[in-house]
Amino acid sequence: MKYIVTLLLLLCSLQLQAIEPQKPTILAFGDSNTWGWKSVAESEGSNGKFADHERWTGVMEQALGGNYKVVVSGLVGRTTDLDGRNVGAISAESFNGAGALPMAIARHNPLALVVIMLGTNDLQSGYNKTPREIARSAFSLARTVKGMNNALYSHYPAPQVLLITPAPLGDTSKTPLKSLFQSGEAPSKQLSAAFTAESLADENQDIWLMDAGKITTTDGADGIHLSQKNHKLLGMAIAKYIKSKSTAL
């Protein structure tokens, strides 16, 4: 008799799980600061990765109180719409955010919101993109999200999109990547104004915009990445913004 009662309780539990409504899902789409790169000085050895709960994405999910599921698509070196460099088995095209974004949305649908934080890698020497060009590319990604109705034969509407202006670069002289990023330090400080100008020029005015530079600094040892403290600050701030917009999701 005891085993029959246990089985009935288990079946009831499974039925309740089956009818439990699915949490709205948020996709975080970005570069190494979304992946969770833990920077160290050259003298300290190899770089690592923050734990899930330490990254801004995990902090955000926790601060949202369990009301949303957060999935993360962060790739080291990802740009808005530029091919990178071949790195082993990873092709140059794999770093192009514009190419990867539609598939990421289709893979994780249904989505309530896509949070995009890209543009830092566009500052690398050799790309020669101005801050305004970077902003235009980022807004083009946001408009891609808004156009993803019924993606890949689904019946799901396009998600809302939140665009995050990357924080300006700090001192990159202490990283092996300084030859790539040092020339981007000055223009990185113009991204905030460029993203704001592009937002004002957007015809539909339906792309949400936040400025990470008003919340955090790239205070990791390499001047490119966020420290654990700033991951927490950013995650809490984004969660607060999302809560203020929750009726639109």
Image (cartoon, rainbow, N blue to C red):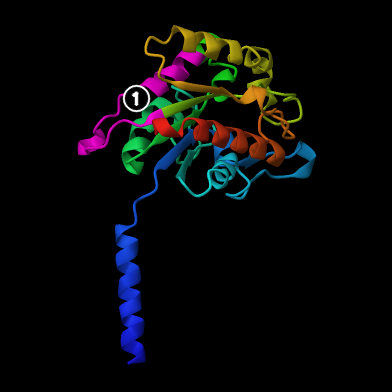
Name the residue beneath numbered marker 1.
146
What is the total number of numbered labels drawn onto the structure image? 1
- Tell me, yes or no, whether the highlighted magenta stretch contains residue 77: no
Q: Measured from the top left, where is residue 64 in percent x and y?
A: 53, 43
Task: Characterize the local packing of mark 1: few (<14), some (14-19) or many (20 or more) Cα atoms within 10 angstroms.
Answer: some
- Tell me, yes or no, whether the highlighted magenta stretch contains residue 146: yes
**Which of the image's four quarters has the C terminus?**
top left
* Residue sitting nearer the eye, 146 or 240: 240
* Residue sitting nearer the eye, 69 or 245: 245
Left or right: where 162 falls relative to 154: right
Residue 128 versus residue 180 in the image, above or below: above
Name the amino acid type tagged 1.
Lys
Q: Measured from the top left, where is residue 7 in percent x and y?
A: 32, 81
- Read off the magenta span: 135-160
Q: Measured from the top left, where is residue 225 in percent x and y?
A: 66, 33
Quadrant of residue 230 in the image?
top right
Q: Secondary structure at mark 1?
A: helix
Quadrant of residue 110 in the image?
top left
Q: Is residue 155 visible?
A: yes
Q: Measured from the top left, where is residue 24 in percent x and y?
A: 39, 43
Residue 114 versus residue 120 in the image, above or below: below
Q: Residue at x 54, y 20 (%)?
A: 122
Q: Residue at x 71, y 39 (%)?
A: 229
